[in-house]
Structure formats: structure tokens, C-alpha cells
Image (tube, rainbow, N blue to C red):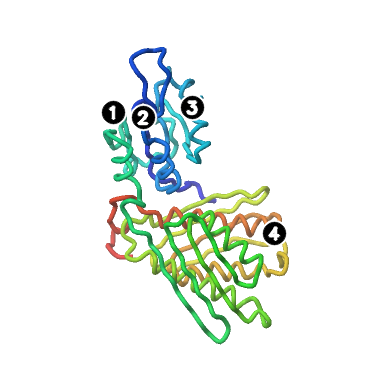
Amino acid sequence: MIDNIHTQGVLLINALGPVITTSSHESSPLRWSEGVFPALKILSDERVYRLFVLCEASHKEKIEALLPTLGDQGITIEKLVTDISEIENLDYEHSHFIGLEDTTQLNFVHFTSWGDIISLFSSAQLLSKRSATIQRSTKETSISITCTLDGSGKGVISTGLPFFDHMLDQIARHGHLDVDINCQGDLDIDEHHTVEDVAITLGEAVKQALGDKKGIARYGFALVPMDEALAQVAIDFSNRPWFVWEVEFTREMVGNFPTELLTHFFKSFSDEARCTLHMKVGKANTHHQAEALCKAFAKALRHAVMRYPKADALPSTKGLL
């Protein structure tokens, strides 16, 4: 079992100033700071940082009542805290406190405007999108795949295998990837060639999109439940392909899809993307096993390919990946 779940860096945002403003009159209502909604929406959607809001204990109840408004705007604030000790798995190196004065042990950023904050922390503002298009044609399949690592979770997928399309869509959605996959395969013979060649081409696209890998997290871990099924996935873009599969499916088929081909899909991806990949799920409903594995893979992949803004170091002490 994976004991430590990977977490991103944290943006701890002081409530008073960056998020809400107030006057010296105690009876004056709290007001949202200018630009707070669109800025937090950008940071929330990108998922580069976990977002927390810090407030004094005496203000917590009043500010807590305002936070659902952020949720209505599609903004995910993980927690309202009164002290940084309330933040679990805090990565001090990659975390920052945004406020009007330095009151925490985190890297301090003085708040001037949300425009300035976005220019500092939005990967969309600072980093070009990583994308690759791969075309692969053999006597068995003809495949075209475009994969954008810094996407929004949109999948346009057609392989001729409905359940496989559904799993690939889960990978796109939960991995926050934009993928366009079209495969014409010899399904009149077998599903094997289609599944294998899609995995090879997708792995090649991810490898190419990663480029020199500078600034990426490199490692990704995820623990994903789906009802009674619990899937665990760990990935390392180490340039050393290795595959560990601790899965025993309870049925040979899900609909018309042979479950043994999922093993082959992830093994082929690992080989072509040149990553270490560990996958595990307990006995459960077969559909739940497969879907939980694909969602956990997606989330682990998202974490591993994530880049911190302005980080350009290669995540290796050897200086080579």
C-alpha cells in the first residue's frame, strides 16, 4: 500500500486583504477584494497549488459563511485554517503565504493585486502548453493522437471499443489532459492490436510533450476509491521503464472488453513513455476495479507531469533523466 499521497505545493492566502476587505468600522460589511474571483478560479482550475485560506480564530465563523460563494464560482478552497499546523502534508519548499505581512513560516509574498499574484503563480501565464501529436500506421492499426499535458480534461476519443473509449476519457478527465485519439484497427481479428498500439502512441506522445522534463514533479501517487474498489498507483518519469501490476480481475470481460488487455495497455504505456509504473487494486466489481485504476493512473500522471511556475531544475541528482 502507498503510505504517502503526493501533494502539490500550497498557496496559503490570508483572508483579510487578498480575499476580503473591511473598514475600521466594526459594523461595516465584509467585501470581496477586487479581482479575487477570476484570479482564484484560474489558480483553482490549474491545480498546480492546493489553495487554503488563513484567518484569525475570532473571524473564522464569519469568513466561513462566505466561502460557499467561492464554491458557487467553481473555486476549490481545500480548507479555512487559523494556523499552518492544520495543513496536512505541507511541502514547505514549494508553498507560499500571500498576505499583507509575513506571519507564517512559509515563503512570503506581499499582496499588492491579484494581477500580480497571477503573474507569479499561474502556469498558464508563465509556461507554454506542452503538447505532442503522434501518428502511427502499421498493417494492423492507423492511429493519430494529440495530447496536451496542460489541458482542461477534454477527450475526443474513438477506438471502436466503447469500454476502452470510456476508460481513456476517464484518464483525460481526471488527468486534466486534452487528448484527441482516433484509431482504425483490425477489430475483426482481435482487440489486442488496437489497445496495444494506442498505448504505444499515447506513451510516445506523453514522452514527447514532457520535453526535457525540467521543472516537473517527476513523481506522482494516487489512491482512488470507487465504491468497494480501492486503486493505488505510483508513477516516476525516471527514463527507466518498469511495470508492477498487483491486480486480479474478478471477471475476464467488461462488456465486450477483455480485462487482460488493461495490463497490456499500461505495460505498453510504461515502456514507451519510459516511466516506472506501479498499479494495485483489491478484488471488487470488475468494472469498478478497471475504472478506479484508470482514475488513479490519471491523477498520478497529473501530479508527475505538473510544473511549478519558474522552476526549471531537472528533478534528478544525476542531472539526467
Q: Nearer the viewer, mark 2 or mark 4?
A: 2
Left or right of 230, for residue 30 = left
Q: Which residue is mark 1?
A: 100
Residue beneath the point at 47% across and 77% down? 135
Label 2's element?
strand
Q: Quadrant of residue 56?
A: top left
Quarter the C terminus occupies: bottom left
Label 3's element?
loop
Find residue 109 and report its horizontal and vertical position in percent: 28, 36
What is the distance, in whole Å, between disc 2 and disc 1 at their CAs? 8 Å
Name the kind of residue labelled 4 in the image. Answer: Thr
Name the kind of residue labelled 1 in the image. Answer: Leu
Q: How many marks overall?
A: 4
Q: Nearer the viewer, mark 4 or mark 1?
A: 1
Q: Which residue is mark 3?
A: 66
Q: Which residue is mark 2?
A: 14
Pick whichever of labels 2 and 1 is earlier in the sequence.
Answer: 2
Label 4's element?
helix
Q: Which residue is mark 4?
A: 286
Name the kind of residue labelled 2 in the image. Answer: Asn
Query: Which label belongs to residue 9?
Result: none
- Asked if the residue under mark 1 is in contact with the one under mark 3, i.e. CB atoms within 8 Å, the reply is no
Q: Is residue 95 above or below residue 297?
A: above
Q: Nearer the viewer, mark 4 or mark 3?
A: 3
Pick whichever of labels 2 and 4 is earlier in the sequence.
Answer: 2
Q: Is residue 21 above or below residue 235?
A: above
Find residue 173 and report its horizontal and vertical position in percent: 54, 55
Q: Nearer the viewer, mark 3 or mark 1?
A: 3
What is the distance, in whole Å, between disc 4 and disc 3 at their CAs? 42 Å
- Asked if the residue under mark 1 is in contact with the one under mark 2, i.e. CB atoms within 8 Å, the reply is yes
Q: Nearer the viewer, mark 2 or mark 3?
A: 3
What is the distance, in whole Å, between disc 2 and disc 4 at their CAs? 45 Å
